[in-house]
Amino acid sequence: MIAQRAALGRPFFMMSPSPPLHWLPGELGWRLAFAMCVATLSGCATVAEPPLAGDAQEWHDVALPGKAKTDYRWERREGRRELLARADASASIFRRRLHRPAEKVRDVEFGWWTQALPDGADLSEPGKTDAAARVMFAFGGDANQLSPRTRLMFDLAHTLTGEAPPYATLVYVWDATAPVGSVIVHPRNDRVRKIVVESGHGALRQWRRYRRSLVDDYRLAFGEPPGPLLAVAVMTDGDNTRSRLTTRYSDIEFR
């Protein structure tokens, strides 16, 4: 099931100083602002290929201007490494840049534990797209295949931020209501697509572990094979619904 609604959202990322966006058509202005945020996920893709989980020092916070930061920190619990995320009406990304060629994109394993889901969140509605648990993968690709409007948005975002937005972003997410297996197109940018891997409140405060085929899931979401993998990130945010959320992430690993 693919959910997509044509609607406008508020700007998600702004550079300062930067040219105003009011000279753009309304929808394009909002979508450019979101692309500028998504550009922070891909970052520079020039580092040599490392293991996906990597050292804790290779992960870093990516703040979203105008947003309080979610607190991310590594902890050791019961002999294993976990990433603790605490959001308090906040939104930020915890990212690792990498470059894995398309032919080496395979299965991935990840897990999470979350205390609560944000009340009133709706991943298909602008201004309500909070989630307690997300694991995100940014991919490269041929931007010439995108629509002229999307290419213009990406070119402007690259000019303003110095980072090109990824060609596509695949997100695994826990949602309160959407059925498992749903594919939800982000309401601000159709190059960001989310697959629901956990739904409802029944598994709260339990560790949940997943093994997914990035190739199959990318084909499901975008209808084509993936390009190179540029970055991996997690995101726990409650800024839109003013939620307080606590989530723990296990290491993210290829299998």
Image (cartoon, grey):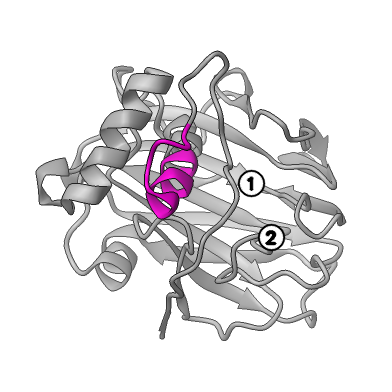
Residue closer to the observer: 161 or 80: 161
Residue 242 visible (yes or no)? yes
Residue 251 visible (yes or no)? no
Residue closer to the observer: 221 or 36: 36
Which x, y percent locates residue 137?
Answer: 42, 47
Q: In this view, does 12 lie to the left or right of 141?
A: right
Report the Cα–Cα distance between label 2 and label 1: 8 Å
Q: Residue 137 carries which label?
A: none
* Type of amino acid at the residue the image marks with label 1: Met
Kindly identify the residue that appears in the image at 78 percent across and 41 percent down.
84
Which x, y percent locates residue 204?
Answer: 81, 71
Question: Majority secondary structure of the magenta segment?
Answer: helix
Question: The residue tagged with tag 2: helix, strand or loop?
Answer: loop
Q: Check if residue 25 falls in the magenta segment.
A: yes
The correct choice, above or below, for 123 with respect to 252 in the image is: below
Kindly identify the residue that appears in the image at 26 percent across and 60 percent down.
215
Circles 2 and 1 in contact, beta carbons < 8 Å: yes
Packing grade of label 1 (10 A; few <14, some 14-19, many >=20) is many
- Residue located beneath label 1 in the image: 235
Q: Residue 131 carries which label?
A: 2
Question: The residue tagged with tag 1: helix, strand or loop?
Answer: strand
Q: Check if residue 100 falls in the magenta segment.
A: no
Packing grade of label 2 (10 A; few <14, some 14-19, many >=20) is many
Kindly identify the residue that appears in the image at 38 percent across and 40 percent down.
24
Bounds of the magenta segment: 21-34
- State the quadrant of the N terminus: bottom left
Kindly identify the residue that appears in the image at 34 percent across and 59 percent down.
214
Which x, y percent locates residue 46?
Answer: 29, 18
* Type of amino acid at the residue the image marks with label 2: Ala
**Upstream in the sequence, badge 2 or badge 1?**
2
Number of disc labels: 2
Q: In this view, does 44 lie to the left or right of 122?
A: left
